[in-house]
Image: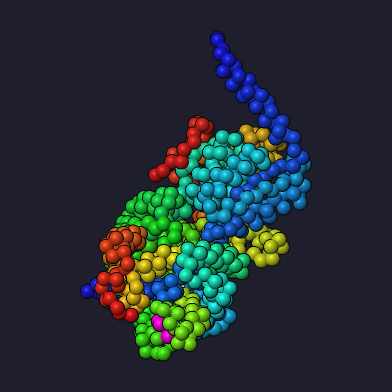
Amino acid sequence: MDLSFVFLVEVLYAVATLVVISAGLAVVFGMMKVINLAHGEFMMMGGYATITAVNLGVNVFVAMLVIAPLVVGLIGLVVERLVIRHLYGRLVDTMLATWGLSLFFVGMATMIFGNTTTGISTPIPGFAVGDYQINGYNFFIIVVAVALLVLLFAVLRGTRAGLIARGAMQRSDMAAALGYSPDRIYMATFFCGSALSGLAGAIVAPLVGLVPTSGINYIAKSFITVVAGGPSLIAGLVSSATSFGVVNQVFAFAVSPIMGDVALLVTAVILLRLMPQGITSRFFKGKL
Amino acid sequence: MSLNRRELLGGAAALTAASLLPRVAMAGDVIKLGSILDTSGPFDAYGKPMDQAMRLAVQEINAAGGLLGKQVEVTAYDTQSDMALYSQYGQQLTRQDKVDVVHGGILSASREAIRQTMRKTKTLYFYNVLYEGGVCDRNIFINGVTPAQQVEALVPYAMKKSGPKVYILAADYNYGQITSRWIQKFVAENGGEVVGNDFFPLDVSDFGSTIAKIQGVGPDLVIAPLVGGAHLSFFRQWAASGMKDKIALASTTLGVGNEQKVLTPEEGDGIMVAYNYSQQLDTPENKAFKTAWAAAYGSSDNIHETAVSTYQGVKTWAKAVEMAGSMDRDAIIAALESGISIDGPGGKITVDPKTHHAVLDVHLMEFENQEMKVIETLPQRQPIDTQAVCDLASNPNDNTQYEL
């Protein structure tokens, strides 16, 4: 009984982690069709922003939820103005450019912070469930993931800005004809996507030892989640994160964490073979 | 006796090479020390202080007049935590730079990448790192602690403090796998039982399911030969789940790269380890060493186990060169095999002639407030694991890494 609860929490935690680390990419790739290979490095910078702020005496939650997204969002803004905006609609070129950016960011982080492992400890203590101890921070990640999804949904569905953004993504020429500047909209969307990546990096930072090359650990998983999710932003994110999270944890528990990752990748290959356009091209069609 | 042309040419070439070799070695006015370490990348927490320790030892040797009246010159390569670069720079050090001795290598994989090159080119090689033991090769000298020295001391101590059921979490390459087998052996010998043994590639950083699995098994003690930055997450997540006060934790690697300073006191306190060195060792040699280090580099905070081993390795080599009175490799090996010892920051350290490993002090320690508090010192431990399989005195041509 206790073990099944622990298992459930670990599964939810795995799903939540996938949602959190993929949300920024889903916005940038899913909405704008920009393949941001520097997504992992955006996360890495979010982690460093958090650790630096905490070391300067800022409250850890403020650092994670406010400072890191803002800092990385602003970096994203600069990147968008200088590089990305010249490359909209050129898929392969953006890949090359953002890959170069990722190398640049790894180099910068190495210069500033050194190529050594840093980290902060988790701000939430563990607690007992029967005979088992659970990492209290897992619940925090689950809460953040849910809040993130609700917020995304509310903004895209409920606000005028969300409507404009969705419109511009589908037909930028029509949005322009109605008097909205696609240039501005893309800029704002990229800012939001970067901020979400920064948030993700900040939130996983207390769980890992951070090095400038940490981004690599997340990039593959987040891309797989977004690609397998398909055209719908939120439904896609939730459905693919759930399938991968469950598979990953079942195999991690039954065999080992390595087999968990292997099983995740095998599932991704099978899913994409059966549904090349992603899960939401067949199920939850037309959902947001 | 008949000779064909090919044999004659081969013999002549060998003779020429043999007559040239000592002349090349004698020709320089400096003694060349080659160093090959990861001073960047994920293993730089180990490598950077090792590089500093090597340079400090050389500085001290040169300030005291050098060796055999010559100054020692350092040729150092940064292998960037990339195993492929070891083979490349190993070749460069021996064939192009033609150094007199090589100190370096960190991971066991990197040592094996260059060991045969050193042997083939007859370049004396010092590997100054704690490792899984068993290397038997006349050309290499190793002064780090081996599992018998470390695990044999750590396992009974940790089991006495916790209980007989042990769970092992190890890095998935030769060090972790061989060390786990040693742990299993000593756990069994001390009347305990290994209830689980998991291996993790070096980039795994999510241990949530493992921690739950461990709780399901319910051991008294977890021993973790985990390696590198990603694996540090385990200790963090272990503490975050509140497991630290429930199940005792020991490690054979944590602290080697000064990880006790990266973990907070809440995460680290109470973790049991056993090494040759702790900054908290209260000996005149350690005090002098820390003062010299601080004078050279500003602060002595980053000194750690493998840095001290490197320092002791260079000093041992220097003493052997003085004793041999020449740079001839066989003369230096003979001097080392006479069982010379030095008093280093980690205590007295003696070359074991039979195995080319070291007889040294092992200190049982616990993490306390980001320091490694010395609980007990076990003086002059023999590398009995390697001694059981390796005897270079009777079999000098041995070139194997024995496994348990």
- Asked if residue A156 can be seen in this view, the reply is yes
Where residue B309 appears, as percent x and y from the top left, is 58, 52
Q: Quadrant of the C terminus of chain B?
A: top left
Q: Quadrant of residue B298?
A: bottom right
Which residue lies at the image location 30% right of the left edge and 79% below the top edge? Answer: A287
Q: Give the overall secondary structure of the magenta segment.
A: helix
Image position of A57 (left or right of B292): left
Where residue A155 appears, as percent x and y from the top left, is 40, 86
Q: How is the model colour-coded?
A: rainbow
Q: Quadrant of the N terminus of chain B?
A: top right
- Total marks shown come to 0
Image position of B27 (left or right of A166): right
Taking the view exactly as shown, the residue that stands out farthest to the left is A1
Taking the view exactly as shown, the residue that stands out farthest to the front is A177
- Asked if residue A188 can be seen in this view, the reply is no
Judging depth in this view, the residue of B233 and B297 nearest the camera is B233
* Vertical placement of residue A16 versus A155, above or below: above
* Vertical placement of residue A42 versus B125, above or below: below
Where residue A68 appears, as percent x and y from the top left, is 51, 79
Judging depth in this view, the residue of B1 and B315 nearest the camera is B1
Image position of B143 (left or right of B29): left
Which residue lies at the image location 69% right of the left edge and 48% below the top edge? Answer: B74
Taking the view exactly as shown, the residue that stands out farthest to the top is B1
Where residue B302 appears, as percent x and y from the top left, is 60, 63
Which residue lies at the image location 43% right of the left edge and 71% below the top edge? Answer: A33
* Vertical placement of residue B213 versus B332, above or below: below
Q: Quadrant of residue A275?
A: bottom left
Judging depth in this view, the residue of A51 and A186 nearest the camera is A186
Range of magenta residues: A164-168
Question: Residue B93 lies in magenta, yes or no?
Answer: no
